[in-house]
């Protein structure tokens, strides 16, 4: 956002076009306005480094913070700013937040610091309604299973000591308990974050009620009042995390480069010995990558939601670097489980049920190779480029990948590809109309994390890809058996089975073809034991569950997100921090696709969903 540097003492405020303003006040203070707002959060920090109230204030889209030595400058700034806001809206709510007195709990005591809020209000009847909302919202907060007490009394410390006419404005004041502290130097990070976020939400709800009572354009949801522009700190943190993420290609780094040769030797030697795989040299020292990762300071982002999303992404990159550091060792399997989890009993049962279904006759038809697949891919990419030339996908035929693989904005096609012509549409719907589409949609958003993927996005991404295959009528029985085989292979690998055990089980017990069984086993045992392949069937279940319930898939086209991020995306859209997707999947416009989707509404079992045609 625009950040004008202004002289406020004795001068008028030069607001940006949207009312945006970010300005130092005295030596320690700051004004921040995301945009024109009929409320302002005030905090006078005696001890900024330890203050929970200060953190609540700076999370707000409209605040003024200062320390006692800047009382005079803050008084002038507040008078000038408040007058400007009231002139624009006709009324203004000042939300004052301060820290409750703090005394350490005696060492060895089982008592916790009191969880007591104190609130007050003054001014018009609208401030009284705002206070009622604040009391209700604070009463619903739960931190570490603790329920607060909320009392009404004197609480106007933020305005103490400054010469101002603030008493002429509507005011709601809040004293925040310091339950985030153990002693002078020790803080509880999760409690700090949860308390700041919960109190910040309560203040936005309070402001929303006030706006409604004063008829000054209250939004339909209080989250719409949140930040509507990215601060430079958030953009900088996002860029730094992206730089670390782009310094290595994770999937290529953990995938063998000699899969075809290893398979040929495996079969030639009578399947008696597990294959020996080779891997690319790492392009990054994982320890150096982690140092860069945790050098990124997320505490200055000033937006709790963005801070959490970026923190989750940092943890995921950390997990990937841990896997690279343990590649081809016994520790790799445990590292992959940390990221992808284990196979649940219900998922394993579904996989086994799919594998138990009667095998259909082998499909026949024209077989096409890599060049034909690449030509079809170019045609589909041109469809999207005709909508917007930012769909700048690269398509490569290569010998160092095992099949079709998307990495970033690139589709790589194995040089030895041989597939039925009838499968091409389904696979390109998966790779281009899901993976590449969400990459380029994500690239059009404000944060690169939407392009590279928010934490744990891969499950729903692969689920959407398989859904695309199903939607166009190309999710064949062999393909479903392949996904189910991956699940049972991961489950067996996690339980301690070796390569040959898993391979033979897939062939003998589950009746998979030898090449398919080898491919699955290779994927699951690459780099030392890779649990990722459970997410394909799991993600497909999740997506089809949403489709069966009639839920919209629209949020998932915005970028690479997880199912758990839908509510966050909704909030970011309300705050205009993300925009609607540039591209919608081409296949969703087809009549036969809409027919299939309509036919599964209300279905609950995976078997019933698969039988829809």
Image (cartoon, rainbow, N blue to C red):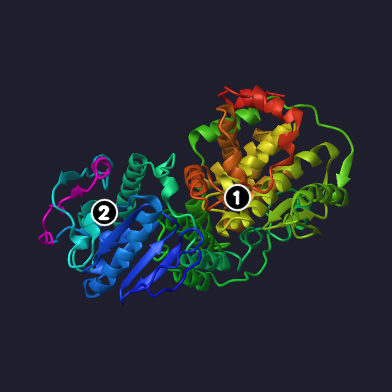
Secondary structure under tag 2 reads: loop
On whether residue 126 falls in the magenta region, the answer is: yes
Q: x and y percent of residue 467 in the render? A: 66, 36
Residue furthest right in the image: 366
Residue at image location 61% in from the left, 52% down from the top: 525
Residue 604 picture quarter? top right
Q: Is residue 571 above or below residue 98?
A: above
Q: Is residue 472 above or below residue 201?
A: above
Secondary structure under tag 1 reads: loop
* Residue identified by numbered label 1: 559
Q: Residues within 10 Å of mark 1 (few under 14, many from 20)?
A: many
Q: Relative to residue 403, is residue 300 drawn left or right?
A: left
**Whole-Å distance between the Cαs marked 2 and 1?**
43 Å
Q: Residues within 10 Å of mark 2 (few under 14, many from 20)?
A: some
The answer to whether residue 486 is visible is no
Q: Give the quadrant of the C terminus.
A: top right
* Residue identified by numbered label 2: 169
Q: x and y percent of residue 30 in the render? A: 35, 69
Which label's residue is closer to the chain start, 2 or 1? 2
Q: Relative to residue 256, is residue 233 drawn left or right?
A: left
Q: Relative to residue 265, is residue 235 drawn left or right?
A: left
Residue furthest bottom in the image: 27
The residues colored magenta run 103-130
């Amino acid at each position: 956002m625009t950040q004008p540097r202004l002289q406020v003492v004795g001068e008028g405020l030069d607001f940006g076009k949207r009312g945006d303003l970010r300005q130092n006040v005295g030596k320690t203070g700051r004004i921040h306005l995301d945009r024109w707002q009929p409320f302002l959060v005030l905090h006078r920090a005696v001890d900024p480094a330890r203050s929970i109230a200060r953190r609540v204030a700076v999370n707000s889209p409209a605040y003024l913070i200062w320390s006692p030595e800047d009382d005079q400058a803050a008084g002038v700034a507040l008078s000038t700013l408040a007058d400007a806001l009231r002139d624009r809206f006709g009324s203004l709510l000042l939300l004052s937040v301060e820290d409750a007195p703090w005394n350490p709990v005696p060492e060895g005591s089982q008592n916790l610091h009191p969880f007591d809020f104190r609130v007050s209000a003054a001014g018009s009847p609208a401030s009284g309604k705002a206070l009622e909302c604040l009391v209700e919202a604070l009463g619903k907060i739960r931190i570490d299973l603790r329920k607060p007490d909320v009392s009404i009394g004197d609480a106007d410390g933020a305005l103490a000591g400054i010469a101002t006419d603030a008493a002429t404005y509507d005011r709601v004041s809040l004293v925040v308990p310091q339950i985030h502290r153990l002693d002078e130097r020790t803080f509880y990070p999760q409690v700090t974050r949860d308390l700041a976020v919960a109190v910040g939400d309560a203040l936005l709800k309070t402001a929303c009620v006030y706006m409604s009572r004063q008829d000054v354009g209250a939004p339909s949801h209080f989250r719409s009042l949140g930040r509507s522009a990215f601060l430079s700190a958030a953009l900088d943190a996002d860029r730094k995390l992206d730089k670390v993420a782009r310094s290595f290609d994770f999937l290529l780094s953990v995938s063998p480069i000699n899969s075809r040769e290893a398979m040929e030797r495996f079969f030639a030697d009578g399947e008696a010995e597990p294959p020996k795989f080779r891997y690319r040299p790492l392009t990054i020292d994982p320890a150096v990558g982690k140092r860069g990762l945790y050098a990124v300071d997320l505490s200055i982002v000033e937006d709790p939601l963005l801070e959490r999303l970026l923190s989750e992404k940092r943890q995921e990159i950390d997990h990937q670097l841990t896997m690279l550091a343990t590649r081809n060792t016994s520790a790799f399997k445990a590292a992959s489980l940390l990221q992808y989890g284990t196979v649940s009993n219900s998922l394993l049962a579904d996989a086994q049920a799919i594998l138990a279904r009667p095998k259909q006759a082998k499909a026949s038809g024209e077989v096409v190779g890599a060049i034909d697949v690449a030509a079809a891919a170019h045609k589909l990419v041109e469809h999207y480029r005709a909508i917007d030339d930012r769909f700048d996908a690269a398509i490569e035929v290569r010998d160092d990948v095992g099949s079709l693989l998307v990495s970033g904005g690139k589709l790589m096609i194995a040089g030895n590809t041989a597939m039925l012509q009838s499968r091409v549409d389904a696979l390109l719907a998966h790779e281009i109309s899901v993976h590449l589409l969400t990459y380029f949609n994500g690239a059009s958003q404000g944060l690169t994390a939407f392009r590279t993927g928010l934490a744990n996005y891969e499950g729903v991404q692969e689920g959407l890809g398989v859904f695309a295959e199903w939607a166009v009528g190309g999710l064949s029985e062999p393909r479903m058996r392949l996904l189910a085989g991956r699940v049972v292979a991961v489950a067996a690998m996690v339980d301690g089975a070796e390569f040959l055990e898993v391979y033979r089980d897939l062939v003998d017990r589950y009746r998979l073809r030898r090449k398919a069984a080898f491919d699955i086993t290779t994927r699951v045992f690459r780099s030392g034991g890779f649990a990722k392949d459970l997410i394909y069937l799991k993600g497909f279940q999740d997506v089809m569950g949403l489709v069966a319930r009639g839920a919209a898939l629209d949020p998932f086209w915005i970028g690479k997100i997880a199912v758990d991020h839908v509510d966050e995306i909704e909030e970011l859209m309300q705050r205009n921090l993300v925009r609607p997707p540039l591209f919608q999947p081409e296949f969703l416009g087809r009549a036969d696709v809409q027919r299939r989707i309509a036919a599964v509404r209300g279905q609950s079992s995976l078997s019933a969903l698969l039988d829809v045609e």
